[in-house]
Image (spheres, rainbow, N blue to C red):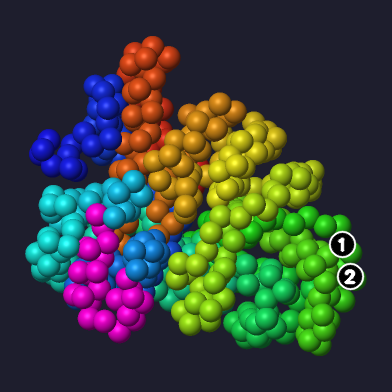
Amino acid sequence: MKNNFIHDNFLLENKYAEELYHNYSKNQPIIDYHNHLSPKLIAENTIFENITQGWINGDHYKWRAMRTLGVNETFITGQAADKDKFLQWGKTVPYTMRNPLYHWTHLELARYFDIYDLLNENSAEKIYNQASEKINSASFSTQNLLRKVNAEVVCTTEDPIDSLEYHQQLSKSNFEIKVRTAFRPDKAILIENEDYIAYLDKLAYTSGIAINSFTNLCEALKNRIEYFHQNGCKLSDHGLDQIHFEKYTENEVNQILQKKKNNQFISNEEGRKFQSAVLVFLCETYHEYGWIQQFHLGALRNNNSRMHKLLGPDTGWDSISDYPQAKNLSNFLNALDSKDKLTKTILYNLNPADNEVMATMIGNFNDGSVKGKVQFGSGWWFLDQKDGMIKQMNALSNMGLISCFIGMLTDSRSFLSFPRHDYFRRILCNLFGDEIERGELPNDMDWIGKIVADISYNNAKEYFNF
């Protein structure tokens, strides 16, 4: 195996890294506490017809790379045959060297399909046939794909209006892997969205509460939080560009909502006040229910209006932004903490320039009540690659306690993305192993092995208590 590109000691540069990985990290179960997998596909134990359907469809990381190489959209999101789409991806892969896609691609082929050939234009058809034959079988159904990676918990992400019917179906089934949901109410917060009132109508219908005031909105959201809670939900998730914190009165917030309902102009300041009010209510309610809250901050979304109009969101037109984060985030967390209503919180950062901001921000609100109460989340989206993960872990190590870190997640829509946990664990072990070899850490494998095992699995298990 050593002659293969992907081998047992891939990314492990010395004997200490190898020992940490193989003895303390590799075999730990996976708690994937944030992803965008389809609960319907899990509940129905779907079998994909071919490798394109399970691996390329919906993967905007791959789509961006193919577009950059000049692949026509017909072979990306268009009407081309699945095999032809895969052949275009195979042609693209050699050009992704030094992008994490190159590592992920070959890790996934190896871990799921025992395919160790390099994917390129010449090997693409053979690999398509090999992988498609396997994935189009019962042993590669969605539930079995999760079993293959030793998943213990997977947590999908749903809107408040979701019925959670597939989570209910799974909870009554014999499927041993826990499939939970995270409550993502951003559409109820972002009043500046053109379809905001149409969304409120859906929320009102689902909750059975007419939304004519800010109080009604809060009642409707709490109704859905209670429903999610009854269905095993323990955490929320927010994908916001930044957290706003403006002083507001309930009267002001009611007036802003009425202006929106009357199709009147909402100023930026009014939008920030409204967002602040809704988010404070939500976070105080999460605390009441003992939930964990997650904030994914710093994305600049839907930059290409022409393509967004054609293909919709989450199709590969987003990037890192340079929003200011520190002051409003501090004020917001402090407002909750001052009332002792700050629940466990995970902050994810997309702009690497803000790594130290986040690493120091969490220390302001770790009050000793819970181990690692406020977390600096793992390298996310554009930063879940080797350099991004190392920088996140270095910032956390230098300014906090990496020993309390809850580790990796996939944040993916693909059932074949779970080797990202393996990728992270190898990078983690190599980071510690390198410093042992250089004498910057002691050769105390029992203790450092415990830290590695905790970051790989134990800390998340304790933190989420699924």
Looking at the image, can residue 455 be seen? yes
Q: Is residue 333 visible?
A: no
Q: Is residue 72 magenta?
A: yes
Image quadrant holding the N terminus, namely top left
Near-viewer residue (456 or 10): 10
Nearer the observer, 99 or 253: 99
Left or right placement of residue 325 versus residue 153 in this view: right
Near mark 1 (Cα within 10 A), the count class, few <14, some 14-19 or many ≥20, is some
Q: Which residue is mark 1?
A: 248
- Kindly indicate whether the residue at mark 1 contacts the one at mark 2 (C-beta within 8 angstroms): yes
Residue name at image x 20 percent, y 69 percent: 87
Magenta stretch mostly in which secondary structure?
Answer: helix
The part of the chain drawn in magenta is: 71-94
For image coordinates 27% across by 61% down, the residue present is: 92
Residue 436 coordinates in the image, percent (x, y):
36, 17
Q: Is residue 83 left or right of residue 227?
A: left
Amino acid type at mark 1 = Tyr
* Residue 15 lies in quadrant: top left
User: Relative to the observer, which residue lies in front, 204 or 429?
Assistant: 429
Q: Helix, strand or loop at disc 1? A: loop
Residue 431, how many percent across, how many down? 38, 28
Amino acid of disc 2? Glu
- At 65% from the left and 39% from the top, the residue drawn is 357
Q: Is residue 57 above or below residue 397?
A: below
C-alpha gap between disc 2 and disc 1? 6 Å
In the shown orientation, is residue 110 left or right of residue 338?
left
Q: Magenta includes 45?
A: no
Q: Position of residue 147 (x, y in %)?
A: 24, 56
**Residue bearing the label numbered 2:** 252
